[in-house]
Amino acid sequence: MKKLLTVGVASIAFNSAFAAGFGIYEASARGNAVGGALVGDAGDATAVYYNPANIAFSTNIQMAVGTTFIHPFCDVEVDHRPQTRMDPGWFTVPTMFFTVPLPADFAFGWGNYTEYGLGTRYNTGWDLAADTQKTTMRQVTLNPNLAYKFTDWMSASVGIRESWIQFENHKQPNHGENFWYANSMLPGGGMYMPNLPNAYNLHTKLKGEDWATGWNVAFDFKPTDDLSFGLQYRSKIKHKIRGDFTMKGDVSTPLGSLPASTVAASQGYSAMSHASAWLTLPQSVTFGANYKVTERYRVGSAITWTEWSSVDRINFNIPSGPGGGYRLPLKWRDTVRVGFGMEYDLLDWLTVRCGYTFDEDPTSKNHSTTMLPCGDRHIIGSGLGFKLAENLYLDLGYSFIRMNNEHYNVAYNRANGTVGQKRYSTRNGHSHLVSATLRYSF
């Protein structure tokens, strides 16, 4: 018997999210509402995320704290057989930003936010439990930036992105299979025992974490008082996730039930082992423009290219585990995310906002995994901004994500050591995003 280790990789503040690939873009209630279209001119402390070069134009200290609550779910089929709905519950994505002007046209900004993440949960014993039963990835970015204003219409910034990531994956290897009797004298090296159905009641857990460093550079241009452009590049971040592998449960055999430790020993490995894996978080480029139509009406757009093709595969090293590790091919492709938004000051103390975002799915149809639902995303954003006091603002937002129905092939290991494949389909994929951000200017 070989153990199937399916790898889940991603990034999210304290839990998981629901974006194409495993990117997370929910940095503020205002940004969520307008489709992230704040790259040219955020005008507050959240510029540390959208375009830190913009903070060079700030003349006072600013702060922003907030959170986004995310609830993803979708209907799932395996080989046209309906499964229990994938519903991991509500997740939380907190953020915090701080900016301060410095002498000689410099400015400093700090951000704590999430750039990547994923999370899925299926019922125990579903038809692809051998691939994934539950996966959670958490990521946090600590991002100090130094910005400089060259002229009244141009600025630039450079920052360090210190990334922490934690991964946890649960699965049920060989779920649903009869007991495999291994014997080199038999054709194929053994045979299934049809009188022992659902023999494998094994549960594996892989958990690890890592710190790694990347960088970012950004530019901001203001050719007129009403028009501004922004550009930001984020580098790759190479993580080596280190942790542990454990296997529990038992297997029904003609000699009776055998615990996982005995089964592992009979196959020449241990039910407990150290584990590691390299994961490259992809580089990206974001460009955006903002335009002030009138004093009360503003529009913006943003486009992000992400090099998801760099996430080609994930190799897990499990020195004392089954087979010494596992290779998960992904074969992802590069994608583009496009967002548009507007905001209007309805009253002196009330602003209304709305936006739309299209988020491409990088997944290969022939090398998929059930760790995250697949399909292009359409995101409708809305929000309100309240001026609570002279320098105090509260932003509230609600976004609805609609995921395209998709069909993918998922490979899994059988008890006899061969590789099987099943058709994995997602339908009626949705996600609710509720967000709030409190901003203060000193």
Image (tube, rainbow, N blue to C red):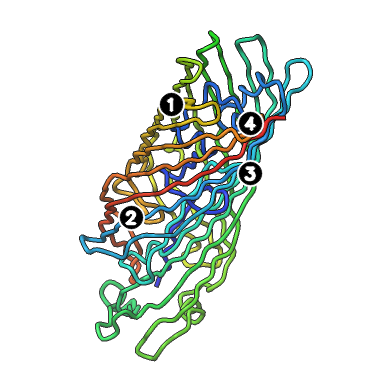
In the picture as drawn, the residue positioned furthest to the right comes out as 103
Q: Check disc 2 and give the amino acid type.
A: Cys
The residue mark sitting in front, 2 or 3, is: 2
Question: What residue do we see at 52% from left, 39% from top?
Answer: 29
| Residue 110 in which image quadrant | top right
The residue mark sitting in front, 1 or 4, is: 1
| Residue 416 in which image quadrant | bottom left
Marks 1 and 4, the one that precedes in the sequence: 4
Q: Check disc 1 and give the amino acid type.
A: Met
Q: Position of residue 270 (x, y in %)?
A: 54, 73
Q: Check disc 4 and give the amino acid type.
A: Ala
Q: Are marks 1 and 4 in contact (CB under 8 Å)?
A: no
Residue that mark 2 sits on: 74
Q: Is residue 43 left or right of residue 295?
A: right
Q: Are marks 4 and 2 in contact (CB under 8 Å)?
A: no
Q: Is residue 395 left or right of residue 354?
A: right
Residue that mark 4 sits on: 45
Residue that mark 1 sits on: 342
Query: 74 and 408: which one is in front?
Result: 74
Question: What residue do we see at 67% from left, 15% from top?
Answer: 149
Query: 48 and 160: which one is in front?
Result: 48
Q: Check disc 3 and give the amino acid type.
A: Ala
Query: 323 and 349: which one is in front?
Result: 349
Marks 4 and 2, the one that precedes in the sequence: 4
Marks 4 and 3, the one that precedes in the sequence: 4
